[in-house]
């Protein structure tokens, strides 16, 4: 698995790195703009990113806008729907409108902060990113 962690908070980045590194390589972006640039470069070079964990509220470009641009890049490159990157939005905002906004931009999952290991792993298993039984 290759993951991209998009998070402006150092502590949250470190936590996600610790939880995801056992399953593969991880790259980090500190805002949505950097995430879009990393994603464009990867898919343009025929490299696959399997998972993006994306914070919603970030400087420069928020998670919703970044996700919209990532989906647009996939469309421009004719990425088949079944091969699109799985995106899990991570946020402290627990509101129906925030969930709806994420779904509008075609996110695959939505986790509330603070991120809990069991919840993250359950979500990744549901998305077939990590194997069943990975929760330990």
Image (spheres, rainbow, N blue to C red):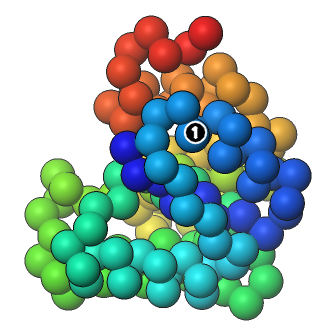
Quarter of the view holding residue 66: bottom right
In this view of the protein, can residue 62 be seen by the observer? Answer: no
Residue drawn at (41%, 76%) of the image: 39
Above-or-below relation of 16 to 72: above
Q: Is residue 124 left or right of residue 90?
A: left
Q: Quadrant of the C terminus?
A: top right
Please provide percent x and percent y for residue 19.
65, 34
Q: Quadrant of residue 65?
A: bottom right
- Secondary structure under tag 1 reads helix
Question: In the picture, which quadrant includes the N terminus?
Answer: top left
Q: Residue at x 59, y 83 (%)?
A: 34
Residue at 69 percent across and 38 percent down: it is: 18
Task: Out of 70 and 11, give the one closest to the viewer.
Answer: 11
Where residue 74 sits: x, y (%)? Answer: 26, 76
Residue 13 image position (x, y, % from top left): 75, 55
Query: Toward the viewer: 2 or 36?
Result: 2
Measured as percent of width and height from the top left, residue 7 is found at 72, 64
For the point 48% across and 49% down, which residue is it?
25
Q: Report the side of 8 relative to 65 (left or right).
A: right
């Amino acid at each position: 698995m290759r993951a991209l962690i998009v998070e402006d908070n150092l502590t949250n980045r470190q936590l996600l790195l610790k939880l995801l590194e056992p399953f593969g390589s991880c790259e980090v972006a500190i805002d949505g703009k950097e995430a879009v640039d990393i994603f464009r470069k990867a898919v343009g070079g025929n490299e696959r990113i399997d998972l993006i964990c994306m914070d919603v509220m970030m400087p420069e470009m928020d998670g919703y806008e970044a996700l919209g641009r990532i989906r647009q890049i996939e469309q421009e490159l004719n990425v088949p729907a079944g091969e699109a990157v799985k995106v899990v939005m991570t946020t402290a905002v627990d509101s129906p409108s925030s969930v709806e906004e994420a779904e509008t931009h075609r996110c695959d999952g939505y986790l509330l902060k603070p991120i809990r290991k069991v919840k993250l792993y359950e979500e990744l298993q549901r998305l077939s990113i990590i194997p069943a039984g990975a929760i330990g």
